Image (cartoon, helix red, strand yellow):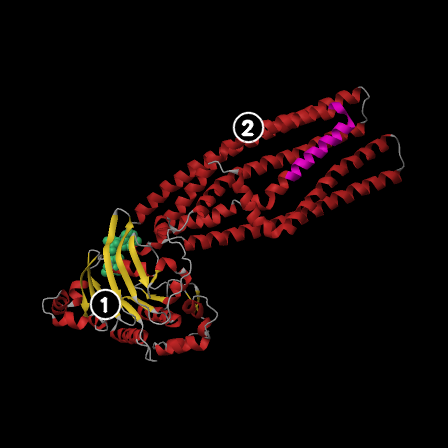
Amino acid sequence: MRVPLTTYRRLLVIYLGPQRSRVLALGALLLGTIGLQLLNPQILRFFIDTAREGGSSRTLTLAALAFFGIALLTQAVSIAATYLSEQVGWSATNALRSDLTLHCLKLDLTFHHQHTPGALIERIDGDVNALANFFSQFVVRVLGSMLLLGGVLVVLWWEDWRVGGLLTAFVVISLLLLSRVRDVAVPHWAAARQISADLFGFLEERLSGTEDLRSSGAEAHTLRRLAEWMRRVLRTERRARLMGMTLWSVTTALFVAGNALAFLISAYLFNRGAITLGTVYLVFYYTELLRQPLDQLIDQFEDLQRASASIGRIQELRELRSAVVDGPGAELPGGALSVEFADVTFGYSPDAPVLHELSLFVAPGHVLGLLGRTGSGKTTITRLLSRLYDPGGGAIRLGGVDLRDTRLEQLRQRVGVVTQQVDLFQASVRDNLTFFDRGIPDARIAAVLDLLGLGEWQRGLANGLDTPLSADGVGLSAGEAQLLAFARVFLLDPGLVILDEASSRLDPATERLIERAVDLLLRPEDGRRRTAIIVAHRLETIQRADEIAILEAGRVCEYGARSQLARDRDSRFARLLRTGLEEVLA
Ligand code: ATP
Ligand code: MG
């Protein structure tokens, strides 16, 4: 995968821009180490030549002390540079991580059905990790290495043009050769990361389905599949590493050749008396010094190869636009909202429509009961209302405003949903109820819990509202979890309530609490009325509806006022009531 240069530049500008001063300080520190590294061999040569000429021991001691002092200073500066570059790298990758997380959260559900959480984790963490070095070191190290290379060569030319010429030729040839083999490993690293993303996806899927897997005795099968995956990981990873090794061997061979060259030319010049022994040392030392920036350049480019595979995939993800685009911000009216479906057609995939030109109207403050067999599209209608998907055709309006014109944030503030499945977070009771909104006072939360009959439960919490809940709701009964979902919607105080009732039965006491919660939610004690759409499986629930719509295979096959339909002996609704709602719709 070739990543265009502008992509690298854009990433650097976005994530290094905010910490410009830190990056500049890092550059200064690296320049410092380069200067110090160039300085030290000069002292060494001075030391050797002075010793051979029988210089005073005082001068020699001073030279030796200077050598040690500079070596120590070099270490200190490079420690500071490492510290700073870690800081730069982590700040940049953390910012990228949170941007990607937010981006994924905003992508529509079709995307999330196509990508397992495991694969996304690998993208958000694995790929971003591979970029840490790119952010913290790449530019600085590559520039620094080039400067050091240049510096060493200038000094060598200065010493003797023949040494300078030879080693310059060596550096140029090395760089050419190395840039040739540079691109070899990229596709292999891309394959290795992809396969590890797939493996995470597989593991995530199996682990989240542990209960079903065990009860169906599919463990052996899963382990066999895992072994196949591991084999695939091994094969791709091995290939990628072999490619990396090839790069490494080429450089090692080059360095050996460079050292040999330096020795040959220095020996020749020394024998002819053109240079002193100190200069021989100097040349040797500088040749050694060449090794480091060349090594660095290779390392950095190898890392860039790995990173570019990750950058390619991160960029692909960043460029994905949610099919659900935030609207320009038309205001929804306050109070109870009317609901209108006008010829809405929708399918999760374009070739399999689930709703067919469906039209519905619910007046503000009215309650619509939605009935229909399993798979008829009831839950789908509720998902369209909170705009998890957009309809393929037709329009949905709340209080007369097309959903696509509203801001998603406002829409989700005004539409409260209680679904069959309650998702809890690994967070405190308070955060689970308010979705991390600090503006809601504790007293209000406590009042809502009391209202819903969770007062006892709340007083039993070890740390009150700060008590942590676990993500899977361990320690909560199904009824309590449902009531917490109601509490969330109460705190939201929405203009439209959607209830997608569980078809399974709860114990009678809890059921009574939930019935009461529904009543309170639809008809708050202050005499207001909320618009509601309730997907009902039980007769008690359906009695609250003003209107009834019966769905069949994505079409409304009966619609009318509940009392009227119930009186009409030939209506489907009346027949449903006679045969028993529960038997037919459960
Ligand atoms: P139930 O009474 O069982 O809850 P429902 O009336 O709520 O059923 P929906 O969940 O709306 O039915 O499903 C309607 C159709 O859409 C079904 O054929 C179902 O297979 C399909 N469907 C539902 N969710 C998805 C999805 N995420 N991706 C693809 N198809 C889906
Ligand atoms: Mg459903």
Q: Is residue 412 left or right of residue 19?
A: left
Q: Residue at x 69, y 36 (%)?
A: 148
Residue 419 in sight: yes
Specify start and end residues of the magenta stretch as a single range. 143-162
Q: Main secondary structure of the magenta part?
A: helix
Q: Nearer the viewer, residue 447 or 246?
A: 447
Residue on which disc 2 sits = 180
The response on whether ligand 1 sits within 8 Å of label 2 is no
- Secondary structure of the residue carrying tag 1 is strand
Distance of label 1 from label 2 (alpha carbons): 69 Å
Q: Return the mark for residue 329.
A: none
Percent coordinates x, y for residue 273 in the rendering: 82, 21
Circle 1: residue type? Gly
Q: Return the mark for residue 369.
A: 1
| Quadrant position of the C terminus in the picture | bottom left
Q: Nearer the viewer, mark 1 or mark 2?
A: 1
**Is the residue 509 above or below the residue 419 in the image?**
below
